[in-house]
Image: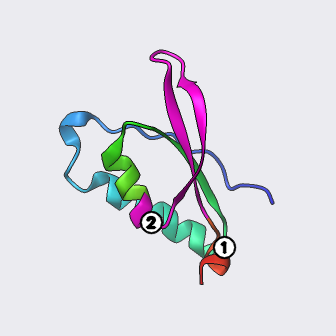
Amino acid sequence: SRGLGDVYTRQDPEQQGRGLGRALMDQMMHTADLMDGPVYLEVRVDNEPAIALYKRFEFFTAGVRKNYYQASGMDAYTMTRPRKSERV
């Protein structure tokens, strides 16, 4: 099925821990659930706070993309959140 679109986010490290990421995810996941759409994302393998947040939103790790971040050569996890009808 066709996706709804792409969103790129990056949070300033000085702003982490203030609930902005959770607020954004709440809204995006609410919309995805209303449309019964799956959600896919990539996250740096060393970004433990983001990975923990995504797991709270029922994402699971589906794979690893080697050297995904070109500037650093860092790998990324590919994470997936199934559509609402598949999670219920």
Crowding around mark 2 (Cα neighbors within 10 Å: few <14, some 14 to 19, many 20+) is some
Q: Is residue 68 magenta?
A: yes
Q: Is residue 71 above or below residue 82?
A: above
Q: Is residue 62 above or below residue 29?
A: above
x 59%, y 28%: residue: 66
Q: Which residue is mark 1?
A: 36
Crowding around mark 1 (Cα neighbors within 10 Å: few <14, some 14 to 19, many 20+) is some
Is 28 on the left-hand or right-hand side of 35? left
Q: How is the image coloured?
A: rainbow
- Image spot of residue 47 (x, y percent): 36, 40
Q: Which residues are magenta?
A: 55-81
Q: Is residue 40 magenta?
A: no
x 37%, y 48%: residue: 50
- Image spot of residue 27 (x, y percent): 44, 64
Q: Is residue 76 above or below residue 25?
A: above
Label 1 vs label 2, nearer the camera: 2
> Could you tell me how far apart the alpha carbons at marks 1 and 2 are, in whole angstroms?
15 Å
Give amino acid for label 1: Asp
Give amino acid for label 2: Phe
Q: Which residue is mark 2?
A: 57
Which quarter shows the N terminus?
Answer: bottom right
Residue nearer the viewer, 75 or 9: 75
